[in-house]
Image: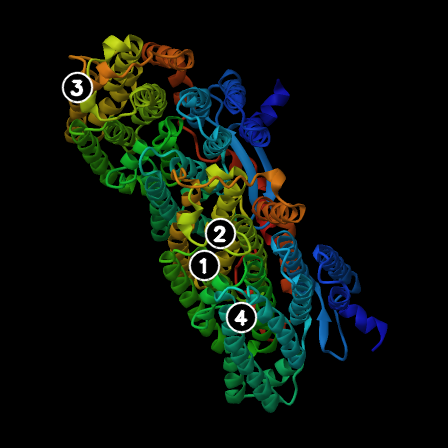
Amino acid sequence: MNELNQTILTWILLVPIIGAVVIAILPDRGKLSAWLALITALVSFGLTLHLPTHFIVGQPGFQFEINKPWIDNPAIFYHVGVDGLSLWMVVLTGLLAPVGVLASWNPIRQRQKIFYSLFLVQQTAMFGVFVSLDLMVYYGFWELSLVPMAILIAMYGRKDGVKAAIKFFIFTFVPSAPLLVAIIWLYVRTGSFNFSDLQMLVANGSLPADALFWTALAFLFAFAVKVPVFPLHGWLADAFCEAPVALAMVIAGKLGLYSMLRFHVGLFPVQARAIAPLLIALTVIGILYGACVALVQRDFWRLIAFATLSHFSLTTLGIYGLNLTGRNGAIYQILNEGVIEGALFVLLGVLDTRYANSQIASFGGVASRLPRTATFFVITTLAMVGLPMLNGFVGEFLILSSTFMNVSRGWAVAATLTIILGAAYALWLVQRLFYGPQSQMTAATPAADLHLHEWVALVPLAVLMLVMGVAPSLWLRSIERSTAQPPSKQAIANPELFSNSQQETAR
Amino acid sequence: MNSADSLRILPEIILTLTGVLLMLVDASLSPAVTRRPLGWIAAFGTMFALWASIWQLSLGTGTGFFGAVETSPFTVFFHVLICGIVLVAILIALDSLPEESHHQGEYFALIVFGAVGMCLLTSAIELLVVFIALEISSISTYILAGYRKHNAQGPESGIKYFLLGSFATAFLLYGIALIFGATGTTQIYEIAEKVGGSQNHALVVMALMLMMVGMLFKVSAAPFHLWTPDVYEGAPSPVVALLSTAPKAGVFALLLRVTYEMLPALRSVWEPLLWAVAVGSMTIGNLAALRQQNVKRMLAYSSIAHAGYLLAAFAGMGPSGIAAASFYTAAYAAMNVGVFAVITVVSGYDDHLPLIRDFRGLLYRSPFLGILLIFFLISLVGIPFTGGFFGKFYAFSAAVGGGAVALAIIGLLNSGIAAAYYLRLAFAAAQRPADGDEPLRIALPQLGVAVGAALLFTTGTTLWLGIRPNAVLRAAEMAAHTLQVPAGEAPAAAVNQPGVSQSPQPHP
């Protein structure tokens, strides 16, 4: 087992790629690709479960670390590891892989081979973002995560996939150019891409403050687009409308939010503090704006897009409150959103494939036709709204209470309005879709209730919503204990590592 | 001529013999017989030349023929690159040239003769040899560009390239004449010595300008780029694969020699000049490419932009700039030849799918080719894990290291623009085909062996450069260090430049 600890992260990164290659080689016949993808996804989920079971809570620093030279010049190291922050992100990504495959089971009928291969490449890219501790490797995975996503949006778009794909790609690619310049600048000044080294060097004030301000801003800008933070959300609604369900559930949120926590707040605490007031204002605007716009949407994908904007803004608020409770709440909320969005997208995908329609007004009374779908939908919606005992409540409560106590009562009160608005748009959506008299379309279209594979995807998610709501300490324990991470013990304890990376560059 | 001298031009000799053999065999075969085996002879000859170039490393750095040619890691790097490109171009042509054409044999002979010129161009250190080499390569490519004779665009392409190209070469020759007038020699190192020792540079500056016109024309840098889209559009795709990479690699090697080796004393003249040309090429190329509907015209403008990125690396003085430029040339060659290989297979020798919208649904109609096309385009955009990323990374790091931060920023903004048009093609390919579209049904097994090998080779190289660039980068750095920079000039400039190959200064 100990040996596995040394290589587990490499396996987590490799297994989806291997699966993708196998799928690409074998013929595109029947459900073969889908089964292979499901097996790969389950194996990789199983591997990610190794992390929390062997994670030593309370041990400072990164665990399961691997650090090997990769490219001599610039000195890029294959440096990966997880701590309390990334641990559950990796597991969440692993969990959503089989869910994504199951959600694509029926809707994806053409070119399954390409779909599942790219889906698994996307999986590796996301794992890579969460585990990379070398800025260049991180950047590589960050950019890579755009590619399969954009191709699949273009391929499987419902109406105008190409437009949504280009919008998504350009929105994320252009801000990553300043990010790259910032990373190169850090490297030119310090000779290292290593996260811990950089954290130490930034903390001890050896870099000029005004340049650091711009560097931090470049980082933040790239992440804020990806979350997205108001007013950078222009790509979100189109992407949600066009993306295949399995990808829409991971397109927003966690990558950007995690990156903010690790590489903005974590790397540039002083600069983050300076810019926090602006972000708090933007996030509160985003929370309210998203919720209000969600209220008036006619298409349920767009409604969910703006609801997502509102929810992720709340999470960002937790991050930029810059206190421990808010931070823990934010991390927990990222996990909650992942689970809830996963279930929500599966369910909306069910409606979209059964009725080939996403206009809310055409629905009505679906509950009498699809009672199980309705049940799951209600549970998910309640979790999203933040009903106590379900997971959404815990995160929202931690974030809002910490904002109220430590940041600003005014902003906290404003942000809390989202609970009311959120309940309004979410419950109204449930009512319009599932209850009331059957609409013409619902009555005329024969539709089957949940299939076995959808059932299999949804039950664990629903159970998780309940467990995460009742026993958050299972997760919060490992999140809390390794959140307060002193900067770079590793570099202090092991100065050789740092000088090594310089010698590498010197050659 | 003693045998030691001829070993210095061994790859050129092998290529020449191959070319002559091809012509003789072609002439002696009856017109009815297929010429395909000739293509394989050309391919093996090129491979042999490639091997010979690598073998030349064991000769060590040195000159031959009374200081007319040189072999060094620098020349070997470009020889390998050019032979690799030519090999792939031959392989693509093998499977795509129409059988009924009566000019197949000539076609392969011309490609091989062109390769002789391009290779010689990189090893020549005597300006008259440079001129002869450039003419050998140009004349072959003029003919190749106009190869689609039955199509009105073919001869147009050939004639345009010929007229403008010979005009540009005339400029180069005039520049050489003036250099000779100013210094009394045409040997690059002697010129460098004479120019370094004198004070009055007026005539040499004039000569440099004229030579620049000739060289920048050949690499299709703005403002000498106007021929590019028309020539690319009219020439057959396998030829464009060659045309857009190999001669450019040769001329870039020459440009490196002329600037860094021959006239380092005039750095204050050529550096701002190249800076302006770099910015102009990137911007004009990218903006014009945005508006194109024709795939080959779009890629023509994109190659103008890439010439700009490459020139940006020149701004990083010293070995780091040279290494970055060399690496970029290699990465660009791999992905661009790859793109044209895919386009040749999809659209055929006759370009029956000329427009971007014709590529709609490629990923559905032929997943294999679709994914390859998207892969090469993504590499051209510069996404990590592809060769294009590290090419751009090193080029802009060199520019930043050389103090040209503005250039790097303009370049990165440009790559944002570039993403838009590359993705237009990539996503058109990913789109669901419209109802009327015929399925293409070009799957892996139906691909010819030759084209399959070409695709494998370019894909592999592009991935390799993106995942493990160590070896190629080391080769490029070795090449950069052996480019003999006259003492007292460049080393002083190179020491202070933190760039890709030097250790960034650790902060106290």
Are callouts 1 and 4 both on one chain? yes
Say which residue appears at 53% left-offset and 33% top-offset. A80
Q: Quadrant of the N terminus of chain A?
A: top right
**Label 2 close to label 1 by CB (< 8 Å):** yes
- Please tell me which residue is depicted at 62% across the width and 20% down the height of the picture: A2
Helix, strand or loop for disc 4: helix
Does A325 sit above or below residue A222?
A: above
- State the separation of the CA atoms marked 4 and 2: 27 Å
Label 2, label 3: how far apart the Cα atoms are = 47 Å
For disc 1, the chain is B
Reading the image, the residue beneath label 3 is: A428
Residue under pointer 1: B302
Q: Nearer the viewer, mark 1 or mark 4?
A: 4
Does residue A261 appear to the left or right of A506 in the view shown? left
Q: Is residue A141 visible?
A: no
Task: Look at label 3 and name its amino acid.
Answer: Trp
Mark 2 chain: B
| Subunit bearing disc 3 | A
In front: label 1 or label 3: 1
The crowd level at tag 4 (other Cα within 10 Å; few <14, some 14-19, many 20+) is many
Mark 4 lies on residue:
B158
Considering only order in the chain, which callout, 4 or 1, is on the residue closer to the N terminus? 4
Q: At which x and y percent is residue B202?
A: 50, 88
In the rendered image of this protein, does residue A400 appear above or below residue B247?
above
* Relative depth, front residue between A210 and A24: A24
Which numbered disc, 4 or 3, marks the residue closer to the eye?
4
Residue A376 occupies which quadrant of the picture?
A: top left
